[in-house]
Image (spheres, grey):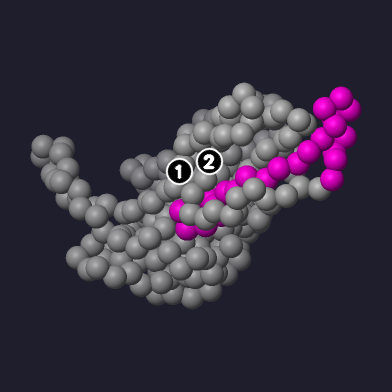
Amino acid sequence: MPQGRILYTACRPDIHGFSCNYWEMRVNPDTGEPLGGQRPLTQWAGFYMANTGATADGNRLAFPRESKQLDVYVADFDARSLKLTRPRRLTHEEGLNFPTGCSRDGAAVIFGSNRNGRWGIFQQRIDESSAIPIATSLETIPKETPLTPDGKWLFQLSYPKDSPWFLNLLYPSGTGFSPPGQLSRIPVDGGPPETILSDILGVRCTAHQSAFCAVAAKTVDGKALVFTGIDWLKGEEKTLARFETNARTNTIVKAQKPRSVRLELADALNSRSSLR
């Protein structure tokens, strides 16, 4: 900007994504040294600016004003025609509401929401208009909450506050960021999270009561990706597969005993289920 002015945005999360405001700082045009402190130029709330342009004299700004409203929709699926009926809106509260799973009988949707100003996990039957809280006042929220095969617990990954997990939630195709998190189990009927494991990248469960759940995690040196079967009640673990990875590209370069891994996974999953 002219006259050594630097304009930038400072943002804080809110129920519609972010509330952002413009701040200004002046610097010496020749040396870049700050000339005084920063000061706010606006006091707005409820939206954010994705990009900013300015006139040549720096007196006017142009920017797109954005905010997000996410809602859960449901529809019936016709297995014969492979078509969906017209979707209908299930959630009507202000904020970010997104599905993370469903009940074992398919009669209710499990979803994350910041409708109350803090993150929470809720359950709402598809034929009702109100939701029941499962867990509230969470610092972070996962994009998926898999149910255990017995249908009594759901898994939740919580992330470090200083990690960009929120950006990954809002822009899943843009960041590709998947931070390790702390794995907890939560009773489907409601209750506080109970921590099980740390430094977990993801968790999946099969739908069969005789089957199991598995988690993915990197080794301490970051050179391998390990898939582990877990018992969500006893805390017991069993290594299912281990893959050497390229730390720079984060891709699998070598599988340990691939034939035995395939057979073990197929046997554990009854040759019909899959973890995706």
Specify few, some or many for label 1: CA neighbours under 10 Å numbering under 14, 14-19, or 20 or more: some
In the picture, measured across the screen, residue 137 lies left or right of residue 147, that is right
Q: Residue at x 58, y 27 (%)?
A: 55
* Residue 8 percent coordinates (x, y): 66, 40
For the residue pair 135 and 249, the one nearer the viewer reads as: 135
Number of numbered discs present? 2
For the residue pair 181 and 173, the one nearer the viewer reads as: 173
Q: Quadrant of the N terminus?
A: top right
Visible in this render: residue 46?
Answer: yes
Residue 230 lies within the magenta run: no
For badge 2, the amino acid type reads: Met
User: Which is more N-terminal, label 1 or label 2?
Assistant: 2
Circle 1 sits on which residue? Answer: 66
* Residue 137 percent coordinates (x, y): 54, 69
The vertical placement of 171 against 53, above or below, is below
Considering the numbered disc 2 on the image, is that residue within a helix, a strand or a loop? strand
Q: Quadrant of residue 12?
A: bottom right
Q: Are marks 2 and 1 in contact (CB under 8 Å)?
A: yes
Q: Quadrant of the C terminus?
A: top left
Considering the numbered disc 1 on the image, is that residue within a helix, a strand or a loop? strand
For the residue pair 199 and 252, the one nearer the viewer reads as: 199
In the picture, measured across the screen, residue 147 lies left or right of residue 48, that is left
For the residue pair 106 and 11, the one nearer the viewer reads as: 11
* Residue 238 percent coordinates (x, y): 58, 52
Per the rendered image, the range of residues in magenta is 13-36
For badge 1, the amino acid type reads: Glu
Circle 2 sits on which residue? Answer: 49
